[in-house]
Image (tube, rainbow, N blue to C red):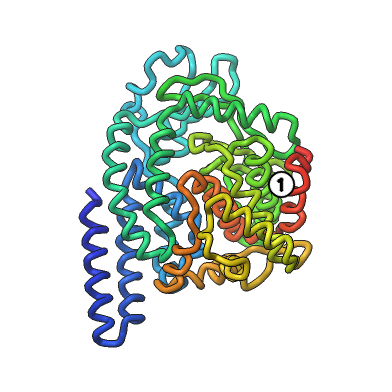
């Protein structure tokens, strides 16, 4: 299926790199090869269902970090990955609806389709509107096959994102992807989040109404999809929801690990809704949930130490990162500071406006093989922390797409002082 594509891309890039060295034009050839590699990657991912499509959706969230010479031709492909895949006819889903309660009226036209299943609006037995998420028949077999195929994407991603340790990311992704096939486990996750956030006025988790191995039924939400807010223009009333959505999204992401001990690890626009008044964020899809590995807390500690230029705080953060096994012991506190440095400090002002340009600027220092190799020899984040890393960086990437204005320092400070200080 896709195995030959990245393998051939890797061979071609390696060959061209050698040729570039001989001809002293490595940079030009590297840029051309990145462009061809990105085209191949996005084209392949955009036309697949299952595991490969899921990792494509995860990649699409980080669109603001991709260099401008690559993003121009492929923003449309990435947006397509963020949104939804072509749905299957309702009749082809019938085998997944075994033992489904009789009398429930399901609209045969799906409201959303994704990599592992699609969602239909329905009227439940009590007359309430519900969302019925139906797993694609045979998707488990497809995911197992994709698990093997996805490993071939690792070398391509590592060439496209130097220093990314993409193989670790792919392996961890495959592990969680297989967990996402367990709808009963997803229902348990969602109920835990719902109980925790039940007293919140601004974060809403839909209740789980019914579940089977291949179907999960939850409360219906009429709130606005986050992707519509991201794509809104200045004259649109949705444009004013950008900052409220970003603030609530980051509140949800920062609070969960310390206060709940769990991470919602699938931060893409299709999983979030915002109310028309901007006062409530609805969170969907709890298939990719993992345990807190303290990444969020230690990120906050390091970020505040960096901003305050406090040697004692920086030494504490440095020591904790090494003790956790995330840094090579040879990395000094000063090296640690340089590794985490940003060009514009989002903690230097009371509220910072995130943007695509800001994220691209931060990512730019890793867009060379030498910088990537330097980072990969210093940072040693284990696979178990990658889901929490993805949750936080994905939330910040969405804030960049929203161009949201966020009181980041205040939120990180509250997190360190008291994990429940967000007054949920």
From the viewer's side, name the closer residue of 97 and 105. 97
Residue 269: in sight, yes or no?
Answer: no
Q: Position of residue 20 (x, y in %)?
A: 27, 81
Residue 209: in sight, yes or no?
Answer: yes
From the viewer's side, name the closer residue of 327 and 363. 327
Q: Is residue 304 depicted above or below 365 in this figure?
A: above
Instruction: Tell me what residue is drawn at x 31 percent, y 42 percent.
Output: 147
Farthest bottom residue? Answer: 24
Q: Position of residue 88 (x, y in %)?
A: 34, 35
Q: Is residue 13 left or right of residue 56?
A: left
Q: Disc count in the image?
A: 1
Quadrant in which the C terminus is drawn: top right
Q: Position of residue 159 (x, y in %)?
A: 35, 65
Q: Is residue 80 depicted above or below 194 in this figure?
A: below
Q: Is residue 50 depicted above or below 189 in this figure?
A: below
* Residue bearing the label numbered 1: 278
From the viewer's side, name the closer residue of 292 and 232. 292
Q: Position of residue 345 (x, y in %)?
A: 68, 68
Q: Is residue 412 left or right of residue 145?
A: right
Instruction: Tell me what residue is drawn at x 43 percent, y 28 percent.
Output: 182
Quarter residue 39 falls in: bottom left
Instruction: Tell me what residue is drawn at x 53 percent, y 37 percent.
Output: 290
Within 10 angstroms of label 1, few (less than 14), some, or many (20 or more) residues? some
Instruction: Tell me what residue is drawn at x 32 percent, y 32 percent.
Output: 140
Q: Is residue 114 depicted above or below 246 in this figure?
A: above
Q: Is residue 107 left or right of residue 174?
A: right
Under circle 1, the secondary element is: loop
């Amino acid at each position: 299926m896709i195995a030959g594509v990245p393998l051939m891309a890797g061979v071609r890039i390696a060959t061209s790199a050698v040729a570039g060295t001989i001809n002293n034009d490595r940079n030009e050839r590297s840029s051309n090869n990145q462009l061809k590699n990105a085209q191949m990657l996005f084209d392949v991912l955009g036309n697949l269902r299952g595991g490969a499509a899921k990792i494509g959706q995860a990649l699409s969230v980080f669109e603001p970090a991709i260099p401008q010479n690559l993003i121009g031709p492929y923003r449309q492909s990435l947006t397509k990955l963020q949104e939804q895949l072509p749905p299957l006819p309702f009749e082809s889903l019938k085998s997944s609806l075994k033992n489904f309660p009789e009398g429930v009226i399901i609209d045969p036209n799906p409201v959303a389709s994704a990599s592992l299943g699609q969602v239909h609006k329905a009227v439940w037995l009590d007359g309430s509107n519900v969302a019925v998420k139906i797993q694609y028949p045979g998707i488990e077999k497809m995911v197992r096959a994709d698990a093997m195929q996805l490993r071939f994407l690792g070398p391509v991603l590592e060439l496209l994102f130097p220093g990314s340790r993409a193989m670790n990311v792919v392996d961890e992704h495959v592990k969680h992807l297989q967990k996402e096939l367990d709808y009963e486990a997803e229902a348990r996750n969602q109920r835990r989040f719902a109980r925790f956030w039940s007293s919140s006025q601004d974060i809403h988790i839909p209740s789980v109404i019914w579940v089977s191995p291949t179907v999960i039924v939850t409360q219906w939400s009429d709130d606005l999809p986050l992707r519509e807010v991201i794509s809104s223009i200045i004259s649109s009333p949705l444009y004013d929801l950008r900052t409220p959505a970003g603030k609530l999204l980051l509140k949800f992401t920062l609070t969960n690990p310390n206060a709940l001990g769990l991470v919602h690890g699938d931060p893409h626009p299709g999983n979030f809704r915002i109310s028309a008044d901007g006062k409530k964020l609805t969170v969907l899809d709890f298939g990719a949930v993992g345990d807190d590995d303290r990444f969020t807390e230690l990120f906050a500690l390091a970020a505040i130490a960096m901003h305050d230029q406090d040697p004692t705080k920086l030494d504490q953060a440095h020591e904790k990162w090494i003790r956790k096994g995330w840094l090579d012991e040879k990395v000094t506190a000063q090296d640690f500071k340089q590794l985490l440095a940003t060009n514009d400090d989002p903690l230097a002002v009371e509220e910072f406006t995130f943007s695509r340009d800001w994220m691209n600027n931060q990512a730019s220092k890793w867009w060379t093989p030498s910088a990537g190799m330097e980072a990969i020899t210093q940072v040693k984040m284990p696979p178990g922390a990658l889901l929490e890393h993805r949750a936080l960086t994905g939330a910040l990437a969405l804030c960049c797409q929203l161009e949201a204005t966020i009181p980041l320092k205040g939120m990180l400070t509250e997190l360190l002082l008291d994990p429940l200080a967000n007054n949920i």
